[in-house]
Image (tube, rainbow, N blue to C red):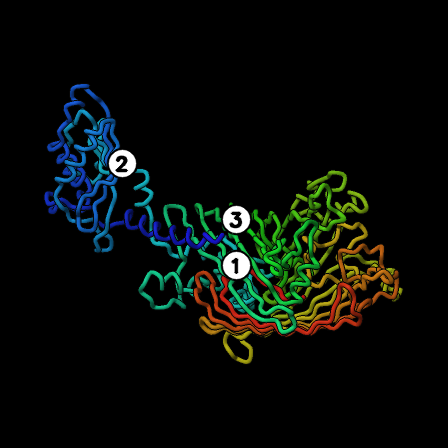
Amino acid sequence: MRYFLVVALVLAYFSGKAQNLATYEKPPIFNECQNEAFDNLKPCFNFTLNNFVFNNFKIPQVVAEESYVGNLDVLFEINKQGEFKIIYVDAAYDELKEEAKRVFSLLPKVTPASYNGKPTFVQYSLNIPIPLQQPVKRDDSTAQDRPEKKDSLKATLNSEYDNLNNSLKAYEGEEYDSELNIPFTHSFYARFDDEMNAIGTNSHTAAKPFVYSEVKPYFDIKAEKRSLVKDVDSWFGRKLFNEHLVAVKGKNYWFTIDPIFDLQVGQDTEADFNTTWNNTRGVLIQAGLGKKLTLSTSVFESQGRFAQYFNQYAESLKAFGPDPAIIPGRGIAKRFKSDSYDYPVAEAYLSYTPTDFLNIQFGHGRNFIGDGYRSLFQSDVASPYPYLKLNAKFWKIKYTSTWMWLRDVRPEVVVDDAFLPKYMANHYLSWNVSKRLNIGLFESVMWADTNGRGFDVNYLNPIIFFRAIEFQTGQGAGNAILGLSAKYKWNNKVNLYGQFILDEFSLSDVTAGNKSWKNKFGFQLGAKYFNAFKIDNLLLQAEYNQVRPYTYSHNTIVLNYAHFNQPMAHLWGANFRELVLIGRYYYKRWFADAKIILGQRGLDFNTPEDSFAYGGDIYTTENNRIGDTGITIGQGNKTNSFMTELQAGYVLNPETNLRLFTNIIFRDFNPEAITPTTTDSNTLWFSIGIRTDLFNWYNDF
C-alpha cells in the first residue's frame, strides 16, 4: 500500500505524456510539406518519410541472395528539436537492422510536432516491407497511413493505440454530472442542505449517500469547487490545491485517480502512552463508462493508536480469532507493534442508471437513512458490508430498497472458524406530501442462514411487505422493524424532522401502563436552522434521540440489528436518551464544526452476581431480561455522559476534499458502578493532521 502514491504519480506522469502524444495540434513537418494545408500535413509527412526510406535503403547482399520476403519494424521518436531517434528495430537479419539505423541517421531535421503551439515529442513506428515497395503519394485528408492495400509503409504502427490517444479530451469535472455517490460526511453535506430543503423543492434528503445528479438541480457542486480554485501555475501546485492527481477523458469514458491520506498525531491526557496517531494511505479511483455506468473503488492501508476510551471500545468489539480489535466503522484490526492497530479497508461500488428514474448500485460500503446526525433506521456507524441498492424516483416519491450481506463475528456463533452470515433487507418510501411536508415509511428485516436457507428469495421483491413474509416463514426466522419519519419545512431557514422506530409493540401492555419490555420503540426529534442569525453558511442543529430497552435485540441470538459487533442504527444500541447540539460554519476553504452530546444510558453489569440483560446491549438475548414489566430507560448500570468535539481547518484541495484540521474532544463518562466492562473516564483528546475526508468518523461512544 505504501506504493500507491508512487503508482499514482507515475500514472499522472504517463497520462500527461499520453495526452501530449495524442492531442498535438500539428504533426512533424518536412521542408517539402511546409506549404501543405493542415489536413494534408500528416499524409505529406508519411509519404515524404516513406519515399526517403525507399530511395536510400539498400537491401543487404545476404538478404538479396536468400530472396528474403518479410518485414522490418522500426520504432522511433522525433524530439522537440525535430531530430529522428531510433528506439527499437525488429528484423530477421542483423544486416537489416544496421541498414535501418544508417538510413534514419541520414534523415534531416524537421519542424517538430506541436501541442498548444509548443514543441513536443512524438513516437511513430514504420513497417518496411522486404522487398521494398515504392510508396504512392496521397494528399487528401482521408488518406490512410498505408497508400495501398499491401503497402506496409506507414508512419504509425499502432494506429489503434494512437486513435485512442487522439480521442482524449480535456477533463471537465464529469463526476459532478454523474451517478457517482457524493462521499457522505455530515460536514460536507451541510454545504447544500439548505438548498435541497427549500420550500417547494421536490428533493428527498433522507436516503444517503446522494448521487451527484440528484443534487445538481439544487446546488452546483462543480461550480462551488471551481470557485475555490487557487491561481497557481506549476503542475505540483495545481495537483496539490485544485485538481485530481490523474484525470483522463476519452470518447464515452473518463476516470480520475487520487491518493488518500489520513495522517494525524495527537495526545490523550488520560492515556498511559505518549501520543495518539493515525497513518492511512490509499488510493481512490472513480470512473464513468458511457452515460449509464459509473464506478468507484478505494483501498486504505492504515495503522493507528487512538485515545484510551476509543481503544477500549475497539477491543470490546473484538471478533473471533487472534486479532485484538475492530476499529469502529472500519473493520478488523491486527496488532501493530505492542499497543497499536493495523486495519486495512476496501470499499467499492458500481452505479448503473438504465433510466432517468432508476439507479442501481452494487458495492461494498455503508448507507444512511435519515435527516439527522443519528439515524434510528439505518446508520453508517458499522463496518462496510456488501449491498445491492435500488433507488427509484418518480412523481413526488423516492423509493429505496437495499439488500445487505452482514456478519456475526462473535465466538459463540462461529462455525468451523468462519463468521456467521446473516442478511438484512429494507425499504424506505419518501413522499413529498406538500411543498413543506415529507413523510417516510420504513421497514427492515434481519434473517440468518437458518436451516441452510441462505439469502431468502422471499425478500428480493422490492415492493413486498416484509412483516408478512416474516410471519409466513416461521417464528424466529426473521426480525422485522417498522419505522415512520417526517420532515416539515417551517420556512427556508428552519426544518423540523423526526423518526419513530417500532421493533415490537403490544397494545394491551401499553394501555395497561406497566412499562412492559415488549414496548420496544424509539424516537428522534430534531431541528435545523440554516444561515442562522443571518450569518451565511452557519448551520445550527439540535436533536433528541430516545430508544427503549431491548429495542433492536431478539430472542434468537443472531437476529439482532447489528453487523461486525456494531449496531446498524444508533451507535449506542438501545436503552438510552441523548441530546445532540451541532454548529457548522464554512467560509471559502475554511471550516469549523462544534458538537455537544449529553446522554444517559443503561449498561449491563456483566458480573457473576448480576448477568442480566438490561436492554442496552443489543447482542444479548432478550430472554435474559431483568423482568417483564417496570422496564425504563437507564435501567441497569446508569451512566451519564458528556462530550464536546471542536474541529476547525482548511480545505487544501476542494476537488479531492483533502483538508488540514485540528480536533479537540472532551469526554466525561460516569457510570454508577465500575465493572469489568465499564470504567469511569475523563478524556481530553487533541489531534492535528491532514485527511482526505470521504466518510464519517464517530468518536462519541
> Which residue is nearer to you in this view: 325 or 587?
325
Q: Amino acid at mark 2?
A: Leu
Give the secondary structure at mark 1: strand
Q: Is residue 88 left or right of residue 363?
A: left
Q: Real-space Cα distance between discs 3 and 2?
A: 37 Å
Residue located 25% across and 27% down the image:
92
Q: Amino acid at mark 1?
A: Thr
Mark 1 surroundings: few (<14), some (14-19) or many (≥20) residues within 10 A: many
Determine whether label 1 and label 3 are within 8 Å by CB: no
Query: Which mark is first along the chain, 2 or 3?
Result: 2
Residue located 88% across and 61% down the image:
627
Q: Is residue 625 left or right of residue 257?
A: right
The residue indicated by pointer 3 is 351
Residue 101: x and y in percent read: 18, 36
Residue 6: x and y in percent read: 41, 53
The residue indicated by pointer 1 is 280
Position above or below: 331 against 544: above
Question: Can residue 490 be seen at all in this image of the molecule?
Answer: no
Q: Real-space Cα distance between discs 1 and 3?
A: 26 Å
Position above or below: 502 against 671: above
Q: Amino acid at mark 3?
A: Ser
Residue 22: x and y in percent read: 29, 47
Residue 379: x and y in percent read: 64, 59
The residue indicated by pointer 2 is 157
Q: Quadrant of the C terminus?
A: bottom right
Q: Is residue 404 left or right of residue 226?
A: right
**Given the current orientation, which residue lies at the most extreme front position?**
338
Label annotation for residue 101: none
Query: Which mark is first along the chain, 2 or 1?
Result: 2
Residue located 64% across and 70% down the image:
271
Mark 1 or mark 3, whichever is nearer to me: 1
Mark 1 or mark 2, whichever is nearer to me: 1
